Image: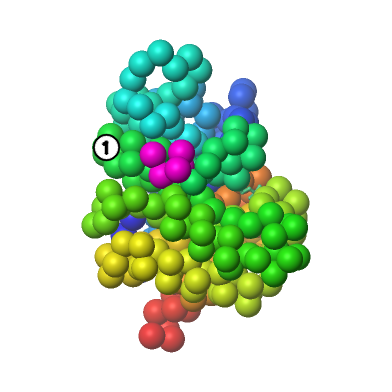
Amino acid sequence: MKQSVKMIVGNWKMNGESTGAKEFERLAARLIEDPCRVDVAICPPATLVERFARMGGPAGIGIGGQDCHPEPRGAYTGSISAELLFEAGCAFVIVGHSERRQLCAETDAIVSAKADAAIRAGLAPIICVGETLAEREAGEAVAVVRQQILGSLSDRLAGREWALAYEPVWAIGTGRTPTLEQVAEIHAAAREAMTERLGDCARHTPILYGGSVNVDNAREILAVENVGGALVGGASLKAEDFIAIIHAAELALVAAGAQG
Ligand code: PGA
């Protein structure tokens, strides 16, 4: 996670059987042939982590988990600890994805404990927040995101490597995205809440946008102020699409460099 470098993270969710390794191989081969200026990571299902970490290393692709348990070990059938992910080759872990907040009833306190676990194990947590459609329509988006940030960040993050991901729940997997003004508004409010919670050290922590990022909208979203990268679901499953998004991030970087 380098400062002033865009970060493009693919969240494969529960996908990747049979053809997944081929797509990953394609992605790795392209990045070896044509190295990029952005940080690239893939968060595959846990069963693929070790293999992808081995294959992705030479291409500079970081590997992340999609969730971790707060405890380092113990009688938690079906769970995976941050330590196990680290040993398997992860450098990151997504925590608090809205699908887990909704389907597994994860609260801000649980998300915060998971982010702490990631730090404990040497992983950089990617902490997800985002409002539902009802909250957006009620004019509560900024307040909801702010509250989630204040509740999901602990002091342990101060001075460590981590990222925030703003993912409006209504934009995930729907093909709908907020306007660029809405993205800018939430990212600015997120930056404010992060620095309020952790001080100046959160001034340069990347804030990723996630929710229906694709080849066509990536460049303009990545050019918005305070957007440090993207968390990409569906469009990360095909190497060609993901590479196009990586190129869009490079173009956004070049444009930002030309301006500043
Ligand atoms: P999507 O998913 O890009 O398919 O909308 C994003 C995410 O859930 O992280």
Left or right of residue 2, residue 31 in this image: right
Q: Amino acid at mark 1?
A: Arg
**Which residue matches tag 1?**
120
Residue at the spot 73% in from the left edge and 66% down from the top edge: 138
Viewer-nearest residue: 74 or 184? 74
The picture quadrant where one finds residue 82 is top left
| Residue 181 in the image, given as x and y percentages of width and height | 63, 77
Q: Is residue 195 above or below residue 52?
A: below
| Residue 136 in the image, given as x and y percentages of width and height | 70, 64
- Determine the main secondary structure of the stretch shown in magenta: helix
Whether the magenta-drawn stretch holds residue 168 is answered as: no
Whether the magenta-drawn stretch holds residue 110 is answered as: yes
Q: Is residue 208 above or below residue 83?
A: below
Viewer-nearest residue: 36 or 186? 186
| Residue 169 in the image, given as x and y percentages of width and height | 66, 52
Residue at the spot 40% in from the left edge and 13% down from the top edge: 75
Dot 1: what SS?
helix
Q: Which residues are magenta?
A: 109-113
The picture quadrant where one finds residue 166 is bottom right
